[in-house]
Amino acid sequence: MLGEMECIPTDWAALRWAFGSTSAIFRYSLKHACRDERGNTSDGLLKAVGRTAGGLALAVAFCVSVLVVSVLSITRLSPLVPGWHLAQMPWAGCMSVLGMPETIFVIVAALLWRKRKTVSAGILACAVTLATHFILYVSAHG
Amino acid sequence: MRISRQTRHVLRIFLDAPKTWRYGYDVSQETGLKSGTLYPILMRLADHELLEATWENSTPGTPPRHLYRLTPAGLSFAREHALESGTGSRPRPALSGAKS
């Protein structure tokens, strides 16, 4: 496949060829690896990989949505409430970017743990990532 | 073995000149299949020993290219299956302007 690229006249065509070939090699290797692992039930493992990837994607999408809604709710609500000035209330910022989302993440992860373990693990991973990011940010910026 | 429309098309290309060794890229040009579709077909046919593959003797400094052609079993398989539903139109070439 690599040798063929020498004969493809344009860079874009060669790039498309490389992507296609790489995906073909990947799928072929995955299929054979699955077959070696589980006899002839490679489709089952492929489906399991798909389910895991789907669960993790769902978890990430959920966490991003919660974070966006949480931040927007604080920033949109603050002008409506007399006496609320976000600049003077750092705790409100902390609540919106860390406290509320983390609480929601932990509750949802606990609720989903038995039935949708992959999604739950993905949400917990996002929670840990967010907390780590927050700690690093605070320690760097004071 | 499941024979898809694309597989049938590849077999037809090989059947045009059964003794000729062909490059993957040339088959791609003739069938209009992209590499991501073509190579799984070639690999599956090779796994079933319907195609044989060999490395081209390349000049130093250039990577070797794979060549494919039908095996005797592949030839009879292709004759049996390639023309089963030959009414479909040929897809357009995926890539154009190959160096020969």
Image (cartoon, coloured by chain):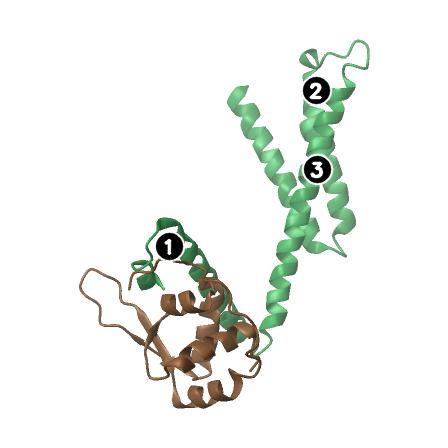
Chain colours: A green, B brown
Q: Which mark is residue A5?
A: none
User: Of the residues shown, which amino acid type is indicated by label 2?
Assistant: Trp
Q: Which percent across, then down, holds residue A38?
A: 57, 75
Q: Quadrant of residue B88?
A: bottom right
**Label 3: which residue?**
A65
Task: Name the chain letter of the residue that bears numbered label 1.
Answer: A
Crowding at mark 1 (Cα within 10 Å: few <14, some 14-19, many 20+): some
Q: Is residue A36 something that shows in the picture?
A: no
Side of A10 where A130 appears, left or right = right
Task: Name the chain letter of the residue that bears numbered label 3.
Answer: A
User: Of the residues shown, which amino acid type is indicated by label 1?
Assistant: Ala
Asked whether A27 or B60 is in front, the reply is B60
Side of B97 where A32 appears, left or right = right
Q: Which mark is residue A91?
A: 2
Q: Which mark is residue A14?
A: 1
Q: Nearer the viewer, mark 1 or mark 3?
A: 1
- Structural distance between the alpha carbons of marks 1 and 3: 38 Å
Q: Quadrant of residue A51?
A: bottom right
- Structural distance between the alpha carbons of marks 2 and 3: 21 Å
Task: Name the chain letter of the residue that bears numbered label 2.
Answer: A
User: Of the residues shown, which amino acid type is indicated by label 3?
Assistant: Ser
| Marks 1 and 3 belong to one chain | yes
Q: Secondary structure at mark 1?
A: helix
Along the polypeptide, which appears first: circle 1 or circle 3?
1
**Is A9 rendered above or below residue B33?**
above
Report the residue at 52% width, 70% height from top.
Answer: A31
Q: Which percent across, then down, holds residue A50?
A: 62, 60
